[in-house]
């Protein structure tokens, strides 16, 4: 089921929201929530990075528990499973601040297993978990162009609609089984990795045939694959624009490992994953961890003898 934001209106200004994790993705998301008039309580592991949001009306707190205190919804946008577990549980975790009946809106890319763990933690406090990972890079977050994939109790998802409206262009709802949103997000990221690999292989052959990567990209975008994936990642690879990452290679490797977890859980072979996974390993060994994750394409070029 797909939802688009057109003329839907709700009274949203009384919603109290906690936001945990104002990194590359979280910061522009928090900005958009504040711009939409929502009250925002923020926790970030490095507080000074969130300080500019104070001028927009945000309040910064020293731990997740304080940021979640009496909130209707707490959003988490953190780097990995370990970070999500850390900010959720424990004495200073958000479960000890979020009110009974409150919603933990998990927007990070994490494993289904971790979502099940935090669901158990919240159930003990009569709190609710909604999974809502996002497709889109930081520039899409800044423009409110994220696509959000949701799963969780239907009424809780409905209550989060004003948040989705402030953050993105629409969302897909996958029903009440929370982990389905995480599985779709992980598989979507695998498709992105696969596109980067396929583009790099094709560009390398084109170069050897004295065809520019830009000409090839333009042709296939017009004829075959008109999509943000081919346009945006194709342009990154054409320009070798990897030094200002929207999403780092080391985080891409984390996501590749999440795909491997799905392979093991569902015993479903994904042989192309092995190729892409090898690119990540090579790139990490070559010191490219902090480059944009599309820099795995450089491993293809080097192997193929292309510049």
Image: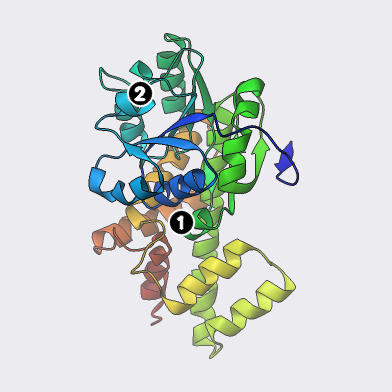
Q: Residue 59 at x, y = what percent?
A: 34, 37
What is the basis of the colouring in this image?
A: rainbow
| Mark 2 residue element | helix
Q: Position of residue 256 (x, y in %)?
A: 42, 47
Q: Residue at x 48, y 77 (%)?
A: 238
Above or below — where is 42 with respect to 295? Answer: above
Q: Quadrant of residue 289?
A: bottom left
Q: Residue at x 52, y 49 (%)?
A: 190
Residue displayed at 43% across by 39% down: 258
SS for dot 1: helix
Tell me where residue 152 appears, x and y as whole percent.
Answer: 59, 24
Q: For label 1, count other residues whose C-alpha is less than 10 Å away and answer few (under 14), some (14-19) or many (20+).
A: many
Q: Which of the numbered marks, if any, corresponds to residue 138?
A: 1
Mark 2 to mark 1 CA distance (whole Å): 25 Å
Callout 2–callout 1 Cβ contact below 8 Å: no
> 123 left or right of 286?
right
Q: In which quadrant will I find the C terminus? A: bottom left
Give the mark count.
2
In the visual, does 41 lie left or right of 10?
left
Task: Give the residue number, with chain letter if any, for mark 2.
Answer: 94
The residue under the point 29% across, 48% down is 51
Residue 269 falls in image quadrant:
top right
Q: Earlier in the sequence, mark 2 or mark 1?
A: 2
Q: Quadrant of the N terminus?
A: top right
Residue 89 placed where, x, y %? 32, 21
């Amino acid at each position: 089921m797909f939802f688009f934001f057109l003329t839907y209106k709700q009274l949203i200004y009384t919603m109290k929201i906690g936001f945990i994790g104002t990194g590359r993705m979280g910061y522009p998301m928090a900005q958009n929530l504040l711009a939409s008039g929502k009250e925002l309580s923020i926790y970030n592991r490095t507080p000074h990075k969130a300080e500019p949001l104070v001028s927009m009306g945000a309040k910064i707190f020293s731990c997740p528990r304080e940021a979640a205190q009496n909130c209707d919804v707490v959003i988490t946008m953190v780097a990995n499973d370990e970070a999500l577990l850390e900010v959720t549980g424990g004495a200073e975790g958000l479960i000890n601040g979020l009110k009974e009946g409150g919603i933990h809106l998990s927007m990070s890319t994490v494993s289904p297993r971790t979502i099940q763990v935090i669901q158990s933690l919240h159930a003990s406090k009569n709190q609710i978990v909604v999974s809502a990972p996002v497709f889109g890079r930081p520039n899409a977050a800044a423009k409110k162009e994220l696509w959000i994939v949701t799963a969780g109790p239907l009424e809780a998802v409905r209550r989060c609609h004003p948040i989705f409206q402030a953050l993105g262009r629409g969302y897909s709802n996958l029903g009440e089984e929370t982990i389905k949103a995480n599985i779709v997000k992980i598989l979507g990221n695998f498709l992105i990795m696969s596109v980067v690999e396929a583009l790099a292989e094709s560009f390398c052959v084109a170069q050897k045939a004295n065809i520019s990567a830009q000409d090839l990209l333009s042709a296939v975008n017009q004829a075959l694959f008109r999509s943000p994936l081919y346009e945006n990642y194709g342009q990154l690879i054409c320009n070798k624009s990897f030094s200002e990452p929207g999403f780092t290679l080391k985080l891409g490797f984390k996501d590749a490992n999440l795909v491997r977890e799905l392979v093991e859980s569902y015993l479903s072979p994904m042989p192309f994953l092995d190729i892409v996974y090898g690119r990540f390993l090579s790139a990490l060994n070559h010191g490219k961890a902090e480059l944009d994750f599309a820099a795995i394409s450089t491993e293809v070029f080097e192997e193929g003898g292309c510049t």
